[in-house]
Image (spheres, rainbow, N blue to C red):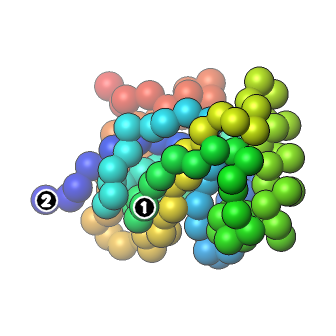
Amino acid sequence: MVKTVDYILKFHEDFYLPIKEEVKDATTRASSKPLNINDFVIATFEPSNKLLLLRIDNHYARRLKDLTNTEAKNEGYRHADLLKHEIKNIYSEISDEDYVYIYQFTVIREKAKTPLREFEANYMLNNGVWMVKQ
């Protein structure tokens, strides 16, 4: 039995190689996602059609102003100020007092029977949206 995919996380295609090469092993989001430790997540990279399978290793909330250099490095940034600046560019309404949600993950290398293969067998990209194949 293959474990199913629990969620889809969207990334800009610039993050494909850093995630694939495990330089980036976390993502910080402005809203909480229904994810638990050991959940499988499909990472989609827009506007390309690339996919990666991720496993959630940890998740927690922190105020934007309290992000650390370690968290920034997990995201592929040199220090926290750069990460905070990027988050504010993406989420223009966010303030330093707002909570952000950090999801740490591991890339699952493809094997013959993985949730990624199951996902690809059951979903298709249609006008930029992943839809169930019928």
Position of 83 with respect to 38 (left or right) is right
Distance between the Cα atoms at labels 2 and 1? 24 Å
> Would you say residue 17 is visible in this rendering?
no
Question: Which residue position is annotated with label 2?
Answer: 1
Q: Nearer the viewer, residue 102 or 122?
A: 102
Question: Which residue position is annotated with label 1?
Answer: 58
Callout 2 secondary element: loop
Q: Amino acid at mark 2?
A: Met
Q: Position of residue 74 (x, y in %)?
A: 65, 68
Q: Amino acid at mark 1?
A: Asn
Q: Quadrant of residue 38?
A: bottom left
Q: Nearer the viewer, residue 110 or 81?
A: 81
The correct choice, above or below, for 31 with respect to 11 in the image is above
Mark 1 Cα-neighbour bin, 10 Å: few <14, some 14–19, many ≥20: some
Callout 1 secondary element: strand
Q: Position of residue 113 (x, y in %)?
A: 28, 65
Mark 2 Cα-neighbour bin, 10 Å: few <14, some 14–19, many ≥20: few
The correct choice, above or below, for 59 with respect to 57 in the image is above
Q: Position of residue 124 (x, y in %)?
A: 47, 35
Residue drawn at point x = 63 percent, y = 44 percent = 63
Q: Position of residue 87 (x, y in %)?
A: 77, 43
> Would you say residue 133 is visible in this rendering?
yes
